[in-house]
Image (cartoon, coloured by chain):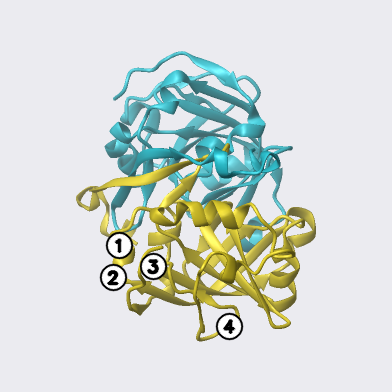
Chain colours: A yellow, B cyan
């Protein structure tokens, strides 16, 4: 498990930097004194301001009712060295297991929601449920990111990108094409 | 520009393999005899069967009305060597430019929709608009992928993952953790 590094406040309008590339994330939640974590790959940025993220959480997940009832969660960005933890969390249920204890993760207190931050993840995005109107039809939660915590390490880690069938792509090198953009398109 | 390689039919229920890792994609459309292409990063898989993909297309884009009016598009997966094409397409408007001509791309005929496939992209997903009920509120198009074309090259290419501010992450190595999954979780 990676050591944690100190985190700083990060502008919520800029979280696309971490989420638009499509990493697998860990969703932490809390309801009636119990915490839980799930692994999630189906998410997208939907708006800069308010900072909206759409996520699919299937009804069979223990987290579904916890997130729905509490109206909150935290989206945590794991590093590639956490891959076996990410897989382990996705292959057991919070109905049977205390995932923070089982996977030796640290629940840090969030600022604006009761759901815990996962300390070992280099970025954490506190979310409030913004629109639940598509839950029945698609299990689509639309969250507003109300606070973002990002460590210096978050820029350097490899992220995990799920391809299905137990296979992950890891993030590779970056390339800067800002010089080819119209200034107004540089967000 | 990469040479094209022959494409085969690919099961639409499995397109998560290509889209869940979060690549930037090119959306091609056709309406009233005109074609267009836009660059898009805000998308997510929403369901296996029917094969649903959610996409945000902001109202200011020339493609918005074309996709809305035709009720169709093609999601095309570019390779990393197409990065300058991807950026160029995202920094001009179909109101001013014929993007297929301008960027020397080839419009191939699709099977089930009128919107063209971009031949130079190693994977093409033909889409029909499945649900437009969230268009007014969020510019959220929910598409059903009705046909997928994938070349052998698609497994080997580097994909592009947009981080904002003109910067792209390229896909890196892969790691197989299937042995840690419950069989029922291997989709």
Q: Nearer the viewer, residue B40 or A91?
A: A91
- Distance Cα–Cα, label 3 vs label 2: 8 Å
Mark 4 vs 1, N-terminal side: 4
Q: Which mark is residue A113?
A: 4
Q: Nearer the viewer, residue A146 or A170?
A: A170
For label 1, the residue is A155
- Chain hosting mark 4: A
Q: Nearer the viewer, residue A25 or A37?
A: A37
> Where is the N terminus of chain B found, in terms of image quarters?
top left
Q: Residues within 10 Å of mark 4 (few under 14, many from 20)?
A: many
- At mark 3, the secondary structure is loop
Which residue is painted at 62% across and 19% down in the image?
Answer: B111
- Chain hosting mark 3: A
Position of residue A79 measured from the top left corner of the image (x, y, whole percent) = 40, 58
**In this view, A16 is above or below B20:** below
Q: Nearer the viewer, mark 1 or mark 3?
A: 3
Side of B92 where A141 appears, left or right: right
- At mark 4, the secondary structure is loop
> Where is the C terminus of chain B found, in terms of image quarters?
top right
For label 3, the residue is A122
Position of residue A40 measured from the top left corner of the image (x, y, whole percent) = 58, 55
Mark 1 vs 3, N-terminal side: 3
Mark 4 vs 3, N-terminal side: 4
Report if the CB atoms under discs 2 and 1 are less than 8 Å apart.
Answer: yes
- Chain hosting mark 2: A
Which residue is painted at 61% across and 44% down in the image?
Answer: B181
- At mark 1, the secondary structure is helix
**In this view, A78 is above or below B77:** below
Side of A152 where B179 appears, left or right: right
**In this view, A98 is above or below B46:** below
Which residue is painted at 49% across and 52% down in the image?
Answer: A84
- Chain hosting mark 1: A
């Amino acid at each position: 498990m990676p050591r944690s590094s100190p985190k700083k406040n990060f502008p919520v309008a800029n979280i696309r930097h971490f989420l638009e590339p499509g990493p697998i994330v860990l969703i932490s939640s809390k309801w009636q004194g119990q915490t839980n974590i799930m692994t999630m790959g189906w998410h997208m940025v939907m708006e800069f301001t308010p900072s909206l993220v759409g996520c699919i959480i299937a009804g069979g997940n223990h987290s579904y009712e916890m997130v729905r009832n509490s109206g909150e969660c935290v989206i945590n960005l794991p590093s590639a060295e956490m891959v076996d933890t990410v897989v382990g969390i996705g292959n057991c249920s919070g109905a049977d297991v205390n995932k923070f204890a089982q996977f030796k993760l640290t629940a840090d207190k969030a600022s604006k929601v009761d759901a815990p931050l996962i300390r070992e993840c280099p970025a954490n995005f506190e979310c409030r449920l913004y629109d639940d109107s598509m839950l029945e039809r698609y299990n689509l939660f639309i969250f507003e990111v109300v606070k973002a915590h990002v460590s210096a390490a978050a820029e350097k880690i490899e992220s995990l990108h799920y391809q299905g069938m137990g296979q992950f792509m890891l993030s590779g090198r970056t390339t800067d094409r800002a010089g080819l953009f119209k200034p107004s398109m540089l967000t």
